[in-house]
Image: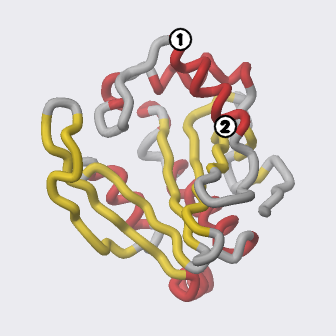
Amino acid sequence: MLRIDFPIATARLILRPFRLEDAEDVGDYQSRLDVARFMRWEPRGPEEVRVAVEQMARETELASDGDCLSLAVVEPGTGTVVGQVELVLLSAEHRQGELGCVFHPAHQGKGFATEAAFAVLRLGFDALGLHRVIGRCHADNAASAGLLERLGMRREARFIGTEFFKEAWRDDLVYAMLRREWLASAARR
């Protein structure tokens, strides 16, 4: 089991477990059509956001397959939650994980997602000892694909017509990084 000392500080951000009082900040981005566009959910109303934040607030450890570590990404100067990052333990036996993130559009284009996702990769590879971490995104989500590439992940697949999604067939991109690739890329940073 991975137990983490919170908060996790990066150069410009704080990553910490979600709190119920984060619902207003989370609602500021989860309620937006442009954010929900590529997500598997529609824009969320206040009650749906509250339920989502309650769930994320419980996701604080990786003990068994399928567990998710959800972290609020906080801008230290304002205390505002500007996004969320997560690490899912896909397989403890095979040391596999999955990275995910969502950010408020007002805080995109500043390198925050890259900084937060890099911290989660460090957690997965260095603290948890994962062998492989994947990232998936909608094939039309150029921003997410670009993020995964900036992190040094390699594109492994494009799955065509994986599900009927928001009135159209969805294609997915899958990226991955192995521990040895992480160690090589981390040495360059």
| Placement of 178 over or under 84, stated as above or below | below
Q: Amino acid at mark 2?
A: Glu
Q: Report the residue marked by disc 2.
A: 75
Provide the secondary structure element on which disc 1 rests. Answer: helix
Viewport quadrant of the N terminus: bottom right
171 relative to 179 in the view: left or right: left
Label 2 to label 1, Cα distance in Å?
22 Å
Residue 172 x %, y %: 26, 55
Viewport quadrant of the C terminus: bottom right
Instruction: Give the crowd class for mark 1: few <14, some 14-19, many >=20 residues within 10 Å.
Output: some
Q: Report the residue marked by disc 1.
A: 46
- Count the marks: 2
111 relative to 94 in the view: left or right: left
Residue 122 x %, y %: 66, 68
Which residue is outermost to the right?
Answer: 5
Q: Nearer the viewer, residue 58 or 106?
A: 58
Report if residue 171 is visible in the image: yes
| Placement of 137 over or under 107, stated as above or below | below
